[in-house]
Image: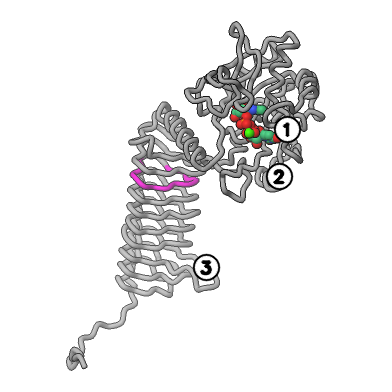
């Protein structure tokens, strides 16, 4: 929207995190707390100001976004003082939306309502009704109209029992905000410049403070320690899982599913328990992911089955392929249509052709494999001499006997057969059996050693 400024307060140190990182750099899902807020702010606001204090350099480096206006609050003299630091850069004829770097799950729809109210009445406040309001500023109303906010530490017994509290989030006409902030004082229990005092000022000014009451506690929940961080992570994951299920994904147990990134999927996909999705993952139709899989940045086609305990990263899996159990598909692996990667198989930077099978206990790296290849148990592509990496080429229809080593660079021809237990150092021709084996011998005079 035009002429909306976000002012995000992020000067707090977050002592209770017991971390070397500033609080707003703790991560929830795949983003820092501050990034969650920034995403919302950037969608609604033409300019975004972040008020920083502790660890400002670290925050700016981590966020690394040139569109943000960074405002330093050298001393933390209160929320009113924090907002005031951004005001010199803000036009009177605009709305200032005040957000918090440690309140990550605020939603667009709520903020839109708040902004719309501020555009009408000048001042709009987001409150919430809490069963346990301890610690929060209480909302004082008269004839239903908001009169003031009284901080817990300044409240009398009657006021303490009020269950409607200040979330801290508000939208205010910037001209009014500037005037009211200029009139703040520190005559309160904490000797701070309270942002909350602007509410009583607006009322005294003859204004009606518009009220939006948040529906979800999680939207306005702040994060002060690792316990609260984990609680919000769970809520975030639950909300995300609900959305995915609404879109048609079957999750066997949404409480045992985590997505730290984005997941796209076709119809009739199923995900079993304890699956972790990271980065950008897409699934075609009818694809099944069994339990305990970790899948990161992968493009997975239709009718794929990923069996349990498989790890896939930066890879492409073609239609009808099957992976695992206990497979590791590493970066730049491209598994072809209807290919089979079985248990304890590792594939790295390799193309596996259509219908090829690597069923058991193999390492395939830096390899181009054609179609209809069969790789026996325990085959290793020896791609590394300790200094350089080399390519292996296995052409269509080749059969590699179990426990063979292919010493790269090497090429196995079309329909070639490699005898089990071979160490292949030279190219193997098409359609012929190649093998390298010492002759088997049985020693006639051999005796079992006796114990001395
Ligand atoms: C504030 C509100 C309270 C509300 C509560 C909601 C005031 C005076 N009180 O209280 O009514 O119920 O939030 O959580 O506003 N900050 C700065 N610079 C400062 C002071 C604070 O950036 O000088 C930031 C903090 O990092 C924090 C946020 O503002 O993210 C809130 O500050 P805090 O002191 O925790 O406010 P509360 O006492 O919780
Ligand atoms: Ca405080």
Left or right, 180 with reference to 385: right
SS for tag 1?
helix
Closer to us: mark 1 or mark 2?
Answer: 1
Colour convention: one colour
Which residue is identified by label 3?
389
Closer to us: mark 2 or mark 3?
Answer: 2
SS for tag 3?
loop
Marks 2 and 3, Cα distance to the nearest angstrom?
43 Å
The crowd level at tag 3 (other Cα within 10 Å; few <14, some 14-19, many 20+) is few
SS for tag 2?
helix
Between 256 and 400, the one nearer to me in the picture: 256
Q: In percent of the image, x 43 and y 33: which residue is there?
A: 238
Marks 1 and 3, Cα distance to the nearest angstrom?
56 Å
Closer to us: mark 1 or mark 3?
Answer: 1
Ligand 1 closer than 8 Å to the CB at disc 1? Answer: yes
- Label 1 or label 2, whichever comes before in sequence order: 2
Q: Is residue 230 magenta?
A: no
**Eyeballing the image, is 82 above or below 61?**
above
- Label 1 or label 3, whichever comes before in sequence order: 1
Instruction: Give residue 432's quadrant in the image.
Output: bottom left
Using the image, tell me which numbered label, if any, was put on residue 82.
1
Quadrant position of the N terminus in the picture: top right
**Residue 106, percent across and down?**
57, 28
Residue segment shown in magenta: 288-300
Q: In percent of the image, x 36 and y 47: which residue is there?
A: 292
Q: In percent of the image, x 73 and y 16: which residue is there?
A: 201
Which residue is identified by label 2?
56
The residue sitting at the front extreme is 157
**Residue 250, percent across and down?**
36, 33
- Is residue 264 visible in the rendered image? The answer is no
Ligand 2, seen in the image, is in the quarter at top right
The crowd level at tag 1 (other Cα within 10 Å; few <14, some 14-19, many 20+) is many
């Amino acid at each position: 929207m035009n002429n909306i400024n976000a002012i995000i307060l992020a000067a707090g140190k977050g002592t209770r995190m017991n971390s070397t990182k500033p609080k707003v750099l703790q991560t929830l899902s795949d983003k820092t707390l501050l990034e969650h807020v920034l995403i919302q702010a950037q969608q609604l606001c033409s300019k975004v100001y972040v008020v920083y204090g502790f660890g400002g350099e670290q925050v700016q480096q981590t966020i690394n976004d040139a569109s943000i206006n960074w405002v330093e609050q050298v001393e933390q003299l209160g929320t009113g003082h924090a907002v005031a630091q951004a005001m010199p850069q803000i036009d009177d004829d605009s709305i200032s939306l005040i957000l918090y770097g440690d309140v990550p799950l605020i939603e667009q729809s709520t903020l839109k309502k708040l902004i719309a109210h501020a555009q009408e009445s000048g001042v709009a406040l987001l409150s919430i009704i809490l069963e346990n309001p301890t610690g929060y500023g209480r909302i004082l109303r008269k004839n239903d109209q908001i009169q003031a906010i009284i901080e817990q530490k300044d409240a009398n017994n009657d006021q303490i029992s009020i269950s409607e509290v200040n979330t801290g989030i508000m939208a205010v006409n910037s001209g009014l905000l500037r005037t009211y902030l200029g009139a703040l004082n520190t005559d309160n229990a904490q000797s701070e410049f309270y942002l909350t005092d602007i509410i009583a000022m607006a009322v005294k000014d003859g204004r009606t403070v518009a009220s939006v009451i948040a529906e979800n506690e999680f939207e306005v929940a702040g994060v002060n320690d690792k316990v609260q961080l984990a609680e919000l992570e769970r809520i975030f994951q639950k909300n995300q899982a609900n959305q995915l299920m609404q879109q048609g994904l079957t999750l066997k147990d949404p409480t045992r599913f985590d997505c730290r990134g984005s997941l796209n999927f076709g119809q009739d996909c199923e995900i079993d328990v304890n699956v972790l999705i990271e980065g950008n993952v897409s699934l075609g139709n009818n694809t099944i992911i069994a339990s305990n899989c970790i899948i990161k940045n992968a493009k997975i086609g239709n009718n794929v089955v990923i069996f349990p305990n498989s790890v896939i990263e930066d890879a492409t899996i073609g239609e009808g392929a099957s992976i695992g159990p206990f497979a590791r598909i590493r970066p730049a692996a491209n598994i072809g249509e209807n290919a089979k990667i079985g248990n304890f198989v590792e594939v790295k930077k390799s193309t596996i052709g259509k219908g090829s099978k690597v069923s058991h206990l193999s390492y395939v790296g830096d390899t181009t494999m054609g179609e209809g290849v069969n790789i026996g148990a325990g085959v290793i592509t020896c791609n590394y001499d300790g200094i350089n990496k080399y390519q292996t080429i296995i052409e269509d229809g080749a059969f590699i006997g179990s426990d063979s080593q292919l010493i790269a660079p090497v090429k196995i021809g079309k329909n070639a057969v490699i005898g089990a237990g071979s160490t292949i150092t030279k190219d193997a021709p098409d359609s012929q059996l190649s093998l390298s084996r010492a002759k088997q011998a049985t020693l006639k005079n051999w005796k079992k050693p006796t114990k001395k």
